Image: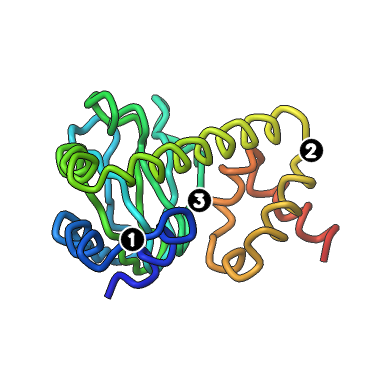
Amino acid sequence: MYNLLRQNIERKIPLTDEEWEIIVSKAELIKLKKNQFLQIQNSNNSYEGFILKGSFKTYILNENGTETVIFFSFENEWICDLESFYHQKPTTYNIKAIEDSEIVVINKMQKAYLFAVVPKLIKFHVLMIERANVAIQQRLLDVLNKTSKQRYLDFKERYPQKISSINNKNLSSYLGVSHEFLSKIKRTVS
């Protein structure tokens, strides 16, 4: 059932069947319909998750009620509100399914247990955190140094199979442009 997860982990570290069974025993499968929340901003419910199917947006709701999309996450990717998960603080972000999705999640206590019982997962964890830091830095550099059009083209190239499933409102928020400007960008690159 969680074959995609096992493959993802085993790209970095080998697992025995016994270790895999321990991991699965601590994981929980959550199925969400489109527009259901995995996490709500300022709550005390944070998970680390691996997406088996579907797509999510990670965003904040600003004081004026508008959304700012920080990240999109898709199949075979990890998702986590890092500060909330690791420091047990209220959540910073909303994480919402943008299509019907399935995600395997684990809480911090379960993860600590897995580190104690399957210590090689610590190496995998370090590699995940490194990758998350690189992604965050790259997102910041893109916002600071690339034009909206360049960011759109990069996103389209990286996720060609998903670009059509993201509505213009979410994509324009992610790119930091108005809906009208996104339409203009799309017209110039079509």
- The residue tagged with tag 2: helix, strand or loop? loop
- Asked if the residues shown at circle 3 and circle 2 are in contact, with their CB atoms under 8 angstroms apart, the answer is no
Res. 91 image quadrant: top left
The image position of residue 154, as x and y in percent, is 73, 52
**Residue 1 place in picture, x, y as percent:** 27, 75
Say which amino acid is labelled 3: Phe
Type of the residue with mark 1: Leu
Verify CB contact (< 8 Å) between mark 3 and mark 1.
Answer: no
Which residue sits furthest right?
Answer: 188
Residue at x 27% of width, y 50% of height: 38
* Residue 160, picture quadrant: bottom right
Residue at left 59%, top 36%?
A: 134
On residue 72, the disc is: 3
Residue under label 2, please give it: 147
Q: Which of marks 2 and 1 is nearer the N terminus?
A: 1
Of residues 76 and 65, which is closer to you in this image? 76
Frontmost of labels 3 and 2 is 3
Judge left or right: residue 3 versus residue 179.
left
Q: Mark 1 points at which residue?
A: 15
